[in-house]
């Protein structure tokens, strides 16, 4: 069963010397003339004391770098991004490993590649926050994967850009593995030219084969067959982003509370992205109470109710019925 689904895929105070820096020899430490010059260099670009402490604790070897010939060129390039300097300082504080990379061989070529797809430097900041290795690996895996989608698969550049910004780790895999995932997505009937293809690609690339299989095994326990799951996944690939336990809890809710089978659930796949504890059960409880009080028609369709925004749900079912649902309001 599930054969198709189972296919592989700072201040003036001197910072304390980090313990991890003890592995460097005195000669290495003196290579930058004075670690204080390194600290001063970072501060000249606007990093705060707190940020600097974070940088050094994460990558203590930076104290051995020559501030003039190594650090300054890299920092100057990065702070040349068309974003507020505080944004770049925050990125470096969180991802200082970027400074371990070669400016000419990795940082600049990777930036140029990403700018072919990202229209603004702020988009590249987002990419780096979500996938710090983008500057390290884009000249091999990321570049190959991007070219694969735009060339062989004919995916619109706008779709590639959205996926790259939203989920850059999708591209941070060996090209052979990436091609296998693309083939698997296509085997479900997704068209590379459609946006849903991007969502399916992101979903399948984010889980291991073992986790994928474990998720699939949940559905038969609630009366679903292979065709049912394929149909659901085609309608909304995000249904498989939830954990195995979440999928189980949603199916349990749909069967035990709503008596929904695959046909009904597939009409409203959004329910698989909602929390049973925080959304589905509370809303269901409110509707059942209002039905018992003759405030809502007993034939109300619950699918649209679950799709509503919190504000819309409150406006339609909570406001005006505060006394009736007083005991349930705390659930929200």
Image (cartoon, grey):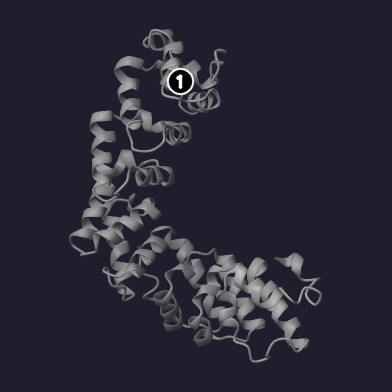
Examine the rendered structure and indicate whether residue 55 appears above or below residue 33. Answer: below
Question: Foreground residue, 322 or 41?
Answer: 322
Q: Dot 1, crowdedness within 10 Å: few (<14), some or many (≥20)? A: some
Q: Position of residue 255 (x, y in %)?
A: 62, 82
The total number of labels drawn is 1
Examine the rendered structure and indicate whether residue 71 appears above or below residue 271. Answer: above
Question: Foreground residue, 70 or 116?
Answer: 116
Q: Report the residue that reaches farthest toward the front.
A: 320
- Could you tell me which residue is drawn at 26 percent across and 69 percent down? 193
- Could you tell me which residue is drawn at 40 percent across and 46 percent down? 126
Q: Position of residue 118 (x, y in %)?
A: 30, 49
> Does residue 67 appear to the left or right of 316 in the view shown?
left
Q: Which residue is mark 1?
A: 43
- Image quadrant in which the C terminus is located: bottom right
- Image quadrant in which the N terminus is located: bottom left
Examine the rendered structure and indicate whether residue 95 appears above or below residue 259. Answer: above
Q: Report the residue that reaches farthest toward the left.
A: 151
Asked if residue 311 shows in the view, the reply is yes
Asked if residue 167 shows in the view, the reply is no
> Does residue 179 appear to the left or right of 290 in the view shown?
left
Residue 37 sits in quarter: top left
Examine the rendered structure and indicate whether residue 265 appears above or below residue 204. Answer: below
Q: Position of residue 143 (x, y in %)?
A: 24, 48
Query: Which element type, helix, strand or loop, lies under badge 1?
Result: helix
- Could you tell me which residue is drawn at 77 percent across and 87 percent down? 292
Question: Foreground residue, 166 or 47?
Answer: 47
Residue 317 sits in quarter: bottom right
């Amino acid at each position: 069963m599930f054969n198709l689904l189972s296919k592989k895929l700072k201040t003036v105070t001197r910072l304390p010397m980090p313990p991890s820096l003890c592995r460097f020899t005195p000669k290495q430490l003196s290579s930058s003339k004075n670690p204080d010059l390194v600290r001063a260099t970072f501060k000249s670009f606007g990093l705060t004391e707190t940020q600097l402490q974070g940088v050094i604790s994460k990558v203590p070897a930076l104290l051995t770098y020559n501030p003039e010939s190594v650090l300054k060129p890299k920092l100057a390039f990065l702070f040349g991004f068309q974003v507020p300097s505080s944004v770049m300082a925050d990125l470096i504080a969180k991802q200082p490993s970027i400074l371990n990379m070669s400016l000419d061989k990795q940082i600049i070529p990777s930036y140029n590649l990403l700018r072919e797809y990202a229209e603004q430097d702020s988009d590249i900041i987002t990419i780096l926050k979500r996938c710090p290795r983008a500057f390290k690996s884009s000249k091999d895996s990321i570049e190959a994967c991007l070219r694969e989608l735009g060339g062989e698969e004919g995916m619109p550049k706008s779709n590639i850009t959205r996926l790259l910004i939203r989920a850059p780790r999708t591209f941070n895999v060996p090209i052979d593995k990436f091609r296998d995932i693309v083939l698997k997505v296509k085997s479900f009937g997704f068209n590379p030219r459609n946006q849903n293809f991007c969502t399916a690609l992101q979903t399948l690339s984010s889980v291991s084969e073992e986790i994928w299989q474990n998720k699939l095994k949940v559905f038969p326990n609630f009366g679903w067959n292979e065709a049912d799951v394929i149909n659901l996944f085609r309608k909304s690939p995000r249904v498989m982003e939830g954990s195995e336990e979440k999928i189980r809890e949603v199916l349990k809710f749909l069967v035990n509370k709503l008596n929904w089978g695959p046909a009904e659930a597939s009409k409203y796949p959004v329910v698989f992205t909602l929390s049973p504890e925080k959304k589905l059960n509370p809303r269901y409880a409110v509707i059942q109470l209002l039905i018992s009080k003759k405030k809502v028609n007993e034939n109300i369709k619950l699918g649209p109710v679950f799709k509503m925004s919190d504000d819309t749900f409150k406006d339609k079912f909570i406001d005006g019925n505060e006394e009736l649902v007083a005991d349930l309001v705390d659930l929200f």
